[in-house]
Image (spheres, coloured by chain):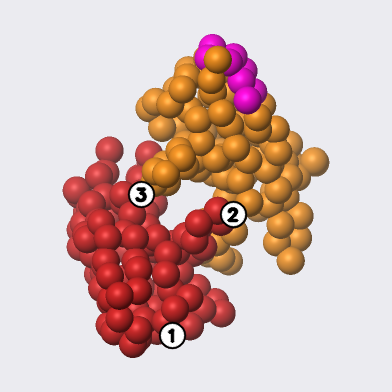
Amino acid sequence: EVHLVESGGGLVQPGGSLRLSCEASGFTFSKYSMHWVRQAPGKGLEWVAYISTTGNNIHYVESVKGRFAVSRDNVKNSVYLQMSGLRGEDTAVYYCARDPVSGSAPPFDSWGQGTPVTVSS
Amino acid sequence: DTQMTQSPSSLSASLGDRVTIACQASQDISHYLNWYQQKPGKAPKLLIYEASKLETGLPSRFSGSGSATYFVLTISSLQPEDVATYYCQQYDSFPYTFGQGTKLEIK
């Protein structure tokens, strides 16, 4: 069974940093690109970042460029989101989701349960 | 960036009704569109991918149609467990973008 488990969320002051983790199990992690998606309280979904299977292709939403960095470790079956220069508008639940390279499954077919991030003084 | 516009923003329907939710893309995205269902406090759940393909194991009352810039999610006969917020998402080009959501309630 596919499992994605996010961790690392919490309360952080404006300007601070936080590192989110997403640990995968139940599938061949190295064959999937990964995404981070967030949802501010009471708001809709916002795609945040993408990392390819090897980590050599990365994309971000404009609002986090230069502040967030996505990475992965295919040995540890994990993807990370290093967040710095955090702002109030980054307050959200952060989800990871998988995206197959081949057509073996549809993109975003599995999501983690989310980890909440609150940016406040 | 490709903007995704859903309509309506909210919808109230009776059990057994046919429900349709529309999603319009600001540019041609071919068939690279997903539909999700999200219930409060839960992660989004993929319903439809590539605009019209039903995710494995889901009830056939859910269907999707459309291509290029106009897409529709249809629930053929509304059930109590369908109360949720529904989102469309394009994955044709980065940044991937979501519609603003449609909140579905029972009348």
Toward the viewer: A56 or A87? A87
- Would residue A15 be counted in the magenta stretch? yes
> The numbered mark 3 sits on a residue in which chain?
B
Q: Front-most of B45 and A92?
A: A92
Secondary structure found at label 2: loop
Q: Which chain is red?
A: B
Q: Which residue lies most toward the right here? A: A75
- Type of amino acid under label 1: Ser
Position of A31 relative to B72 (above/below): above
Q: Mark 1 or mark 3: which comes first in sequence?
A: 1
Q: CA distance from mark 2 to mark 3?
A: 16 Å
Q: Type of residue at label 2?
A: Trp
The image quadrant where one finds the N terminus of chain A is bottom right
Q: Which three-letter amino acid code belongs to the residue tagged 3?
A: Phe
Q: Chain of mark 2?
A: A
Q: Nearer the viewer, residue B72 or B38?
A: B38
Disc 1 sits on a residue from what chain?
B
Please state the horizontal and vertical placement of residue A33, each as a whole percent of the image: 58, 47
List x then y, in percent, for residue B6.
25, 56
CA–CA distance in space, label 1 to label 3: 24 Å
Question: Over which residues does the magenta segment extend?
Answer: A11-18
Mark 1, residue position:
B60
Q: Colour of chain A?
A: orange
Give me the disc on residue B98.
3
Specify few, some or many for label 3: CA neighbours under 10 Å numbering under 14, 14-19, or 20 or more. Answer: many
Disc marking residue A111: 2
Quadrant of residue B32 in the image?
bottom left
